[in-house]
Amino acid sequence: MESITKNRQSLTTLRAMIERAYGPDQVPTDASGDWVAELGHGWFNVAYRLTLRDGRDVVMKIAPPADVPVMTYERGAMRIELESLRMITERTGVPVPHIDFADTSHDLVGADWFVMPFVDGDNLGIVKNDLPPGVVADYNEELGAANRELNSIRGPWFGPLAGPGDPSWRVVFTGIVEDVLRDGELRRGDLGWDYHVVRKTMAEHADVLDEVTEPRFIEWDLWDSNVMIRDGQIVCIIDHERALYGDPLMEAGFVASQLPGFGDSTAFMRGYGWPELTANERVRRRLYCLHLVLIMVIETVYRGHTDAHQYDWARTQLDEIMALLARP
């Protein structure tokens, strides 16, 4: 996926980064650059598959350049990922990447970056259309169970992992949505809706957020494209840069329960062990869907998309969720 947030580097710089992470003996000497390949399916960071001199394959992720504007919630995303990986590794059995080396000094590339071993497996989001529906459902059920284990981590507050947080989920989540709307207004993003109508819609339903009283670690961005599979099992979950303490119902696996355009939540919810949503839970999930599709519309401006496919599709989803929130 093409985006102006991708912080691509020269072979010379990549060699310097490898030397810092693994030592001079692992720096590739091949001048052709055959030892590097960009992994192109990501939406935000640039990621490279690198072959070290001893033959090991690793993945390097580099955060966006400092001078490229990003949405408010994306600031410091790589440090969120590093903290998430530490927490998941220490407190759950969910398979996630091991970090070989992380650098937040900004002296080589002007951004955070890290390296991890290459995961030998297929990306579920890429191969799912080639798999039997029953097999895909099995993976989604396994993902639901893994997501529940991630959500078992209790947080000290609602909001960012590093703080500051708040004891009120309503305060935190409405603030998150307000950040997205301000980002959109700053770049004059066209929602197809007046911004004040979206704000009014959120305010009219925000009382259901008060039902959420216990902060839990949530991934929020755990789509099938962040799931690596091999031999019929999930072997790794990647991309943890949007995690926060919040309501587990905000997880991506629940989106399709209200917006069928995102797929089918049945197997995920079965694996998670979440029964049919109550009336108030449906409203909460609709508010979380509203937040998601607002981001999907507005981020196309920030990432410099030249293809209107995502924008057009997300606009349709925005109309649908606004209708479910009594805004036909």
Image (spheres, rainbow, N blue to C red):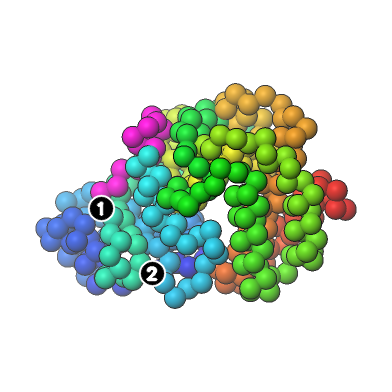
In the displayed orientation, state which residue is furthest to the right.
328
How crowded pointer 1 is (Cα within 10 Å; few <14, some 14-19, many 20+) is rated as: some
Residue found 63% across the figure and 61% down from its top: 180
Quadrant of residue 275 in the image?
top right
Residue 252 in view here: no
Residue found 65% across the figure and 59% down from its top: 178
* Magenta run includes residue 240: no
Quadrant of residue 314 in the image?
bottom right
* Percent coordinates x, y for residue 96 in the rendering: 38, 39
In-front residue for pair 254/60? 254
Q: Are marks 2 and 1 in contact (CB under 8 Å)?
A: no
How crowded pointer 2 is (Cα within 10 Å; few <14, some 14-19, many 20+) is rated as: many
Quadrant of residue 12 in the image?
bottom left
- What is the span of residues highlighted in magenta in the rendered image? 88-100
To which residue does mark 1 refer? 101
Residue found 63% across the figure and 49% down from its top: 171
In-front residue for pair 93/177? 177
Residue 303 in view here: yes
To which residue does mark 2 refer? 8
In the displayed orientation, state which residue is furthest to the front.
167
Depicted 229 relative to depicted 80: above or below: above
Left or right of 141 in this view: 264:
right
Q: Amino acid at mark 2?
A: Arg
Q: Amino acid at mark 1?
A: Phe
Q: Give the mark, 2 or 1, whose residue is nearer the N terminus.
A: 2
